[in-house]
Each structure stands twice: as C-alpha cells, then as structure tokens.
Amino acid sequence: MDDMLLVDRANAIGRLLTEHKADDVIVLDIRSQNAFTDFFVIGTASSGTHAEALERVVRDFARENGLDVALKTRPRGFGQSISPEEWRLVDLGDIVVHIMSETARSFYELERLWS
C-alpha cells in the first residue's frame, strides 16, 4: 500500500475512534521498529459495550475501504485469553487497532513499549 494512503487510513481510524467517543486516541508510527505492522491505533473504551461498538465501527471502515481483517481479534497472554471487555484487537495488516479498557491500557502501556 502507498505510504501516504497508509498514513491517511491510520489517521482516519484514529479520527473515527475519537468521533465515537474513545478516549486518549493515539496513532503510533512503528514502521522503523518492526516488520509485522506499520501503525498501531490505540484508544480507550469506557465499557465492554463501548469497546464492542468501536470494534464494529473499525470493521465497517475496513470493509468500506477494502482492507482485510485478520480472523484473530483478541490478544492472547500467557496461555490465557484476555477478556474482550479489556482489550479488543483488530488486525488490518499494516494497521493494528487496539481498543482497550483504561485498566488494560495502563497495565500494558503499549505507547511506552513502542515509542
């Protein structure tokens, strides 16, 4: 995918999460730090229902823009599945969207790990 189009789509997803009331939305450019993805978009959901709605909005955006969504949508940690109320992950290949509870976000500190 063209770099400018990729940047535009990552930022569009960030704006979309903000428009749908996600808190502390951030778009991280991690192209120079790994080979598995280019951008993380991270937002905080206020509840499990809110996280589910945000995931649906991201999936709709992906479908409307011809982006493939990986089947696995939740991170796994240490042999256990993390609750979907705590962390939803939407893998779009070049862009990975993390929708997290405030508790999960402060515990995992993805911004600190990848910035």
Image (tube, grey):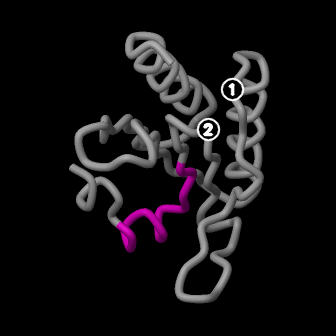
Percent coordinates x, y for residue 99 in the rendering = 57, 51
Percent coordinates x, y for residue 10 in the rendering = 47, 26
Mark 2 crowd level (few <14, some 14–19, many ≥20, 10 Å Cα): some
Task: Reply above or below: 37 against 81.
Answer: above
Residue occupying the point 66% across, 58% down: 47
Residue occupying the point 26% across, 61% down: 113
Seen from the viewer's position, the closer of residues 55 and 96 is: 96
Percent coordinates x, y for residue 86 in the rendering = 61, 67
Name the kind of residue labelled 1 in the image: Leu
Marks 2 and 1 in Cβ contact (< 8 Å): yes
Q: Quadrant of residue 59?
A: top right
Look at the numbered disc 1 and give the secondary structure of its residue. loop
Question: Magenta part mainly helix, strand or loop?
Answer: helix
- Image-based side of 4 in relation to 95, left or right: left
Of callouts 2 and 1, the N-terminal one = 1
Residue occupying the point 44% across, 48% down: 36
- Label 2 and label 1: CA atoms lie apart by 6 Å
Percent coordinates x, y for residue 5 in the rendering = 47, 12
Task: Reply above or below: 53 against 99.
Answer: above
Task: Reply above or below: 64 against 98.
Answer: above
- Image-based side of 64 in relation to 108, left or right: right
Name the kind of residue labelled 2 in the image: Leu
Q: Quadrant of residue 85?
A: bottom right
Residue occupying the point 64% across, 57% down: 88
Look at the image and say whether residue 32 sits in the magenta stretch.
Answer: no
- Residue that numbered label 2 is attached to: 92
Look at the image and say whether residue 106 sits in the magenta stretch.
Answer: yes
- Image-based side of 8 in relation to 79, left or right: left
- Residue that numbered label 1 is attached to: 67
State which region is magenta: 98-108
Mark 1 crowd level (few <14, some 14–19, many ≥20, 10 Å Cα): some
How many labels were placed on the picture? 2
